[in-house]
Image (tube, rainbow, N blue to C red):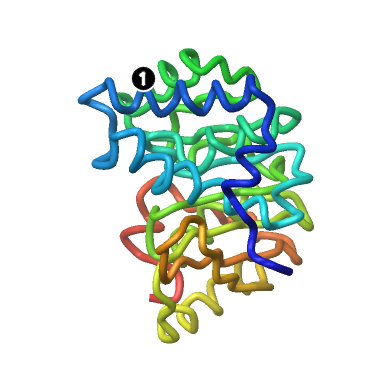
């Protein structure tokens, strides 16, 4: 498949959707307490919006009925995907209250009705168990940790998309055993170019091919303290 032309995808959005994205960018720029170091509209359009929407290359993302964004932070990739996919229900999962409050303001300002803010740790979000077609995570945690957060939320056949930078063979190998234990299988590592000049950007794609053992998720904080395979 040819790389996605993200600028063309954005231009193909309706005027209402483009206005929603513009509102997101304006709100980021205006709020000095926004939980991101990249706030200017020009930079954020590339670093946040384009980098989020590059996931539209994946059929699983484009056709998902329900997406969960783990550690949503300033709202990416989840809020951008919610705007681009108005028929998809998107849950923005964030554990820090201050960030949750920002996300709710951002969602309300941009009038993104198909997104909800879930102020919870991923391990504690019981309502999300086995309910998601796609789970996304961007710059969240070491991959074994992301796998453990995501697997219990995915329905059978669902997809995890994990944003990563430069490929590291040792890290990829270290994720194989945890993935298998959790019922996940890596099906692709896709090199992407979300904007001109972007380098070393990859989407690690996992499919849920088996049942996740009932002992997962472990209680909050354990996945980071004692990563699987570590």
**69 and 47: which is toward the camera:** 47
Looking at the image, residue 4 sits to the left or right of residue 219; the answer is right
The percent coordinates of residue 92 (x first, y second) are 51, 33
Locate residue 116: give its quadrant. Answer: top right
In the rendered image, the vertical position of residue 212 relative to residue 170, given as above or below? above
- The residue carrying pointer 1 sits among few (fewer than 14), some (14 to 19) or many (20 or more) residues within 10 Å by Cα, namely some
Residue 111 picture location, percent across and down:
56, 15
Which residue appears at 53% of the width and 72% of the height? 178
Q: Position of residue 166 (x, y in %)?
A: 40, 74
Q: Is residue 218 above or below residue 85?
A: below
Quick one: quadrant of the N terminus?
A: bottom right
Quick check: 134 left or right of 34? right
Residue 76 visible, this angle:
yes
Query: Residue at 72% of width from left, 33% of height from top?
Result: 88
Q: Nearer the viewer, residue 142 or 127?
A: 142
* Residue 131 vertical placement versus 186 (above, below): above
State whether residue 122 appears in this view.
no
Q: Where does label 1 land, which residue?
A: 101
**Secondary structure state at the residue bearing disc 1:** helix
């Amino acid at each position: 498949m040819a790389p996605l032309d993200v600028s063309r995808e954005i231009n193909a959005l309706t005027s209402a959707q483009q206005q929603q994205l513009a509102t997101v960018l304006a709100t980021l720029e205006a709020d000095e307490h926004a939980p991101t170091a990249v706030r200017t509209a020009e930079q954020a359009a590339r670093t946040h919006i384009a980098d989020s929407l590059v996931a539209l290359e994946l059929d699983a993302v484009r056709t998902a009925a329900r997406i969960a964004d783990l550690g949503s932070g300033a709202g990416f990739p989840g809020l951008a995907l919610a705007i681009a996919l108005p028929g998809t229900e998107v849950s923005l999962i964030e554990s820090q209250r201050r960030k949750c409050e920002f996300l709710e303001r951002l969602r309300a300002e941009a009038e993104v009705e198909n997104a909800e803010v879930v102020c919870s740790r991923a391990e504690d979000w019981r309502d999300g168990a086995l309910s998601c077609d796609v789970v996304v995570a961007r710059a969240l945690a070491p991959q074994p940790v992301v796998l453990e957060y995501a697997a219990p939320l995915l329905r059978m056949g669902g997809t995890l998309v994990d944003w990563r930078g430069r490929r590291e063979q040792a890290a990829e190998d270290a994720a194989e055993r945890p993935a298998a234990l959790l019922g996940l299988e890596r099906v692709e590592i896709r090199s992407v170019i979300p904007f001109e000049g972007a380098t070393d950007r990859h989407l690690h794609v996992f499919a849920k091919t088996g049942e996740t053992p009932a002992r997962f998720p472990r209680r909050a904080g354990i996945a980071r303290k004692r990563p699987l395979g570590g």
